[in-house]
Amino acid sequence: MRSLLIGYALTAVSVTSALAEENASNPLAAVNSVDLRYQYFDLGGDADRQDAFIDGSYMIRPDLKLKYELHYNSTDATGDRENGLEKANAKLIYFPSARPLNETWSMKTAVGLEWIVDFGDVTKGIGTESDQLAPLVGAAFSNKNTGLTLLPLIQHFESYNGPTEVSQTALRLIAIQPFAQNWWVKGDLKVPYDWEGAAWPASAEVQVGYNVNNGVAVYTDLLLGIGSDRTYHQGFGFGLRFNY
């Protein structure tokens, strides 16, 4: 009986770890998924921005992933309520290596390139009207005992056309921890440096989610702008995920 209980516990820990590493909230997870998301941002002074978007991922090969997004905004940042498409994102992520570091930790490395096509209108307070390319490098460190996954990432965004000059280098640290049964919590700290404005518009996100079954998950986001250069004060969001 004791050996059965120990075996069950080890299996549960292993499954929990796998769920954290392959949770679609992990941008480096090898999964196919489509998320329907909504986020609300308090811009201060009674102004807001609302973002409804599709956030998907597809494994082209075991070592090559495509992530894609399509964003639609509603905002009264200019004083009048304006609505329209903001941008479409396509990101290819290649995984050069995946290996155990020791008996507890494993590591997966990643390099990628994101293409951002902007459909916005700055007179409406939507988008930048400038398309961008954004190379990235990162890694995922997964603990098989606790299920914790840590992801340090760095990405540089550079505009190549349009009226708005974009040059921003973003540091990002993500932590994902499964808990209870089928639940997870994610922390996401973003610290970009804007080379054009010499500013640090940092932000943080806390996400709590629940796997309804293998194919469906739901989650909510709490959003917080950080520092005097923040682009929003606070916000919230929610999402519906389909894994396939």
Image (cartoon, rainbow, N blue to C red):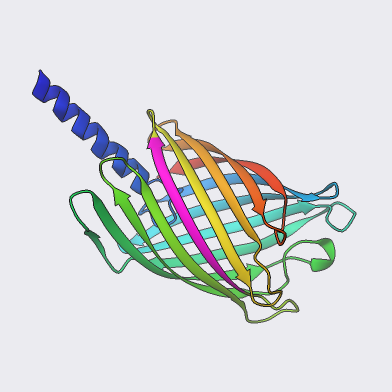
Does residue 153 lie above or below 1 as drawn?
below
Q: Which residue is drawn at 31% across and 51% down?
A: 142
Q: Is residue 63 above or below residue 53?
A: below
Residue at 72% in and 79% down:
162
Give left or right: position of 90 versus 96.
right
Asked whether residue 181 is drawn in magenta, I would say: no
Position of 7 with respect to 155 (left or right) is left
Q: In which quarter of the image is the N terminus?
A: top left
| Residue 211 position (above or below residue 86) | above
Say whether residue 193 is left or right of residue 187: right
Whether residue 40 can be seen here: no
Residue 103, placed above or below residue 228 = above
Residue under the image location 37 percent in, 66 percent down: 110
Q: For residue 15, which quarter of the picture?
A: top left
97 and 38: which is toward the camera: 97
Quadrant of the drawing holding the C terminus: top left
Tell which residue pokes out farthest to the right in this image: 79
Nearest the eye: 176 or 37: 176
- Residue 157 is left or right of residue 102, and the answer is right
- Residue 190 in percent (x, y) is at 56, 58
Q: Give the residues drawn in magenta, as a range.
A: 168-178
Q: Residue at x 68, y 50 (%)?
A: 51
**Relative image position of residue 166 (x, y in whole percent):** 66, 75
Q: Does the magenta stretch include residue 174?
A: yes
Q: Main secondary structure of the magenta part?
A: strand
Residue 111 quadrant: bottom left
User: Furthest-bottom residue in view?
Assistant: 160
